[in-house]
Image: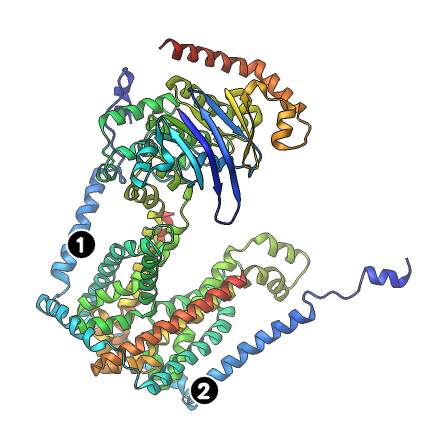
Amino acid sequence: MSEATAPRRGAKYPTTWRRPPFIENPLFRYGSVVLALAYLVWSLGFSIEVDMARVIQGLDRAGNMFARMVPPDFSRWELLYRGITESVLIAFAASFVGMIVAVPLGLAAARNLAPLPVYLVARFIIVLSRTFHEIVWAIFFVKVVGFGPLAGVLTLIVASASFISKMLAEDVENMQPGQAEAIRATGASFPKLLIYGITPQVLPRYLGVSIYRLDANLRHSTVVGIVGAGGIGQVLAASFSRYDYDFSLAILLVIISLVFLGEIFSNVIRSRLR
Amino acid sequence: MLEISDLVKTYPNGLKALHGISLAVDRPMVVAIIGSSGAGKSTLIRCVNRLVEPTSGRVVLNGTEITALGRHGLRKARRRIGMIFQEYNLVERLTVMENVLSGRLGYVGFWRAYRRNYPPDDVAAAFEILDRVGLEGRENARADALSGGQRQRVGIARALMQRPELLLVDEPTASLDPKTSRQIMRLIVELAHERGTPVLINIHDVALAQTFADHIVGLRDGRIVFEDGSDRLTPAVLTEIYGEEDWSTTIRKVEEDDEAEGAEAAKGRDDTESGVAAG
Amino acid sequence: MTVEEHARRYPAVWRRFNPRETLVRYAWYLGIMIVTAVSFWRLDITWVYMLDAHIQAGDLLFRMYPPDWTGFEAVLGALVETIHIATLGTLATVLIAFPVALLAARNTTFNTLTWTIGRFILVASRSVNTVVWALFFVAVFGPGPVAGIWAITARSIGFVGKLTAEAIEEIDVGTVEAIEATGASRLQVLWIGILPQVLPVIYGTFVYRWDINIRESTVLGFVGAGGIGILLYSEINLFRWQAVSVILIAIFAVVVVSEFVSATVRQRIT
């Protein structure tokens, strides 16, 4: 600072100005650049095994694939229809159950409501179920209840319940304590406090998150099938492994338009909730 | 210098904001535009540099017909017109210096702007202007770390960096407290007189307009209903501009203020005007 | 005041909702219940399997204990590859997503056609799950992490691009107006007026998506797109449950750490 202001004492003003660097310490500044470059070299050059020949060949294959994808083949529409319906049903069923399960779990995971042991258990359940990808859960449930849509429903229940309850817990923790305090001051019991002091504050967002989750479940229900948990994913994976790329494209187009419709639907409802 | 003739602006929703405004600023002076909200003050000022595209009419600045320019020509013309905003409109996450230097953007290429590598003359000028507006030593502060008054000083510095032939000022004090408002107004007026730059200024505060402007234009429903020296403002005129209200207190307050601050400002004005005349 | 007048002015009954509103509310509840019931009914679920589910689950957990740490070195290597896939994929995303976001934001796009193209790219990218993208890229590039990186990128463009486009649409128009008033070119307005305003959002979504991508890349191996999923899939197929539990513990650790890192960084940015 001092050397920057010193020359200005005279009549003349400095004719150069450098923007102060983002990171003050030059060691850190250049160090972070070097580290970033080193990471790129390490990860791309040494750590990941890249078969360059195969990648270059891939560009060729991509063109080939596109040629075989277009036009999309809707001739097996019955199979497609059955798979999509199953996916949608899985999404609806799982969203509703997940929404219900999320309420006690979310309240238990709010530090300002739950006693410490309950809070820790609830948080652990949420973290555990969020950590593992839907597909890992799908494998687990396929092992437990066998192939079929039930495993898919259970998977998405776990995914939705953990997502919604995490959001719910955050909302409850961030709510205005004054409102709940005022209700408590009237001598209300805990269930009454829940109805009068907490629900009005968190309900709109809870519903919003639930509807968003319905939309997300629609997207996820298309993949749980890859490991045998029902829905269109199974058909899609099979079409890829059989090189029926024109059928794959047909499935993908249907999924995209379905998800797009779901998104519009969820946006409309969420904007009306506000 | 600046000549506006028959300016009309109709918004796409059918709202007619300006009904044929004609206005000439033929010497370096401060012209205040007063009028109630929705009278078209902001639209008028923005039509001059075509941030709002006028529907019809002409704007001529020192021989350039701004309303006839294409995209490229308009950009060149905008370089010659400085603008100061109500909400300062600084790039909050950049430093004071970058904001001030952004006044030179019309003169440097993209890569120089990208590397913040402005010509030495511009940098020296920026330091000088920062000094002049009272922000010496704050060049490396981020804009969002400044107070409202300081931000507006940066806004003024940015406009002056353009070495403008005309200054457009849009409600410069509406977001500031009364004391800072006076300081900012005085600064703008002093700088304008120092540099012989004509100023077109929108302002809500009648008292401030009367104290600091040489000339006042009253706007009502998109039409000019008053245009004269600021000492000719009477309750009858204010009723004409704003509608019925007891204006005597407003005017009297202004007159009282005039004795203290106004006299001082008027003195400064006389000095600079005679200086301009001499030079 | 007579008793009747008093009763009229101060009725003893008050309802939060009028009868019509109440009816609509219950109709909604009923509708949701019916949709759920129909969904379960139409899915032909073999409920008998649920009867011994707890036994099956217990058995599985029992077989997973104790974890078998002998193959831990291979797990560590696969884990590093998983992180690389997520990081490189997310880096590539940011480079591609910003231009797409410019197209998809109403105030920076060129015309309706470019806006539609931008929006379509974002929607298509988001509708297709990362694993499905992986299926596609494995078919193109063959099995391996390259397919995984592209799958992560393809899915994340929609996410990062959507949030960036929203941020661009919400910038302070006054600042842009001020920069335009200096006579700056379009590119300069973009760089000086718009980019500094959306930069925090870009950093934030980058870190946020990176955290999500770590989770996503743990399963890309199931379809052959590299990472720890390959190992997990083969161990499951070989019924080596004790090795599976080691992998799950490793995934758990990495995901928790990355979530912590991402949350800390995001807190410091804003």
Q: Are marks 2 and 1 on the same chain?
A: no
**Residue located beneath label 1 in the image:** A39
Q: Quadrant of residue A70?
A: bottom left
- Seen at 20% across and 63% down, the residue is C80
Chain containing the residue with disc 2: C
Three-letter amino acid code at the position of disc 1: Tyr
Judge whether C204 appears above or below B143 on screen: below
Front-lying residue, B226 or A263: B226
Q: Is residue A232 left or right of residue A61?
A: right
**What residue occupies the far left of the structure in this picture?**
A53
Which label belongs to residue C42? 2
Is residue C259 something one can see in this rendering?
Answer: no
Q: Which residue is more in the foreground, B132 or A234?
A: B132
Query: Which dot marks residue B230?
Result: none
Residue C169 location (% of width, % of height): 40, 51
Could you say whether the residue bearing mark 2 is in a helix, strand or loop? helix
Whether residue B50 is visible: yes
Query: Which quarter of the image is occupied by the C terminus of chain B?
Result: top left
Task: State the residue at coordinates (52%, 33%).
Answer: B174
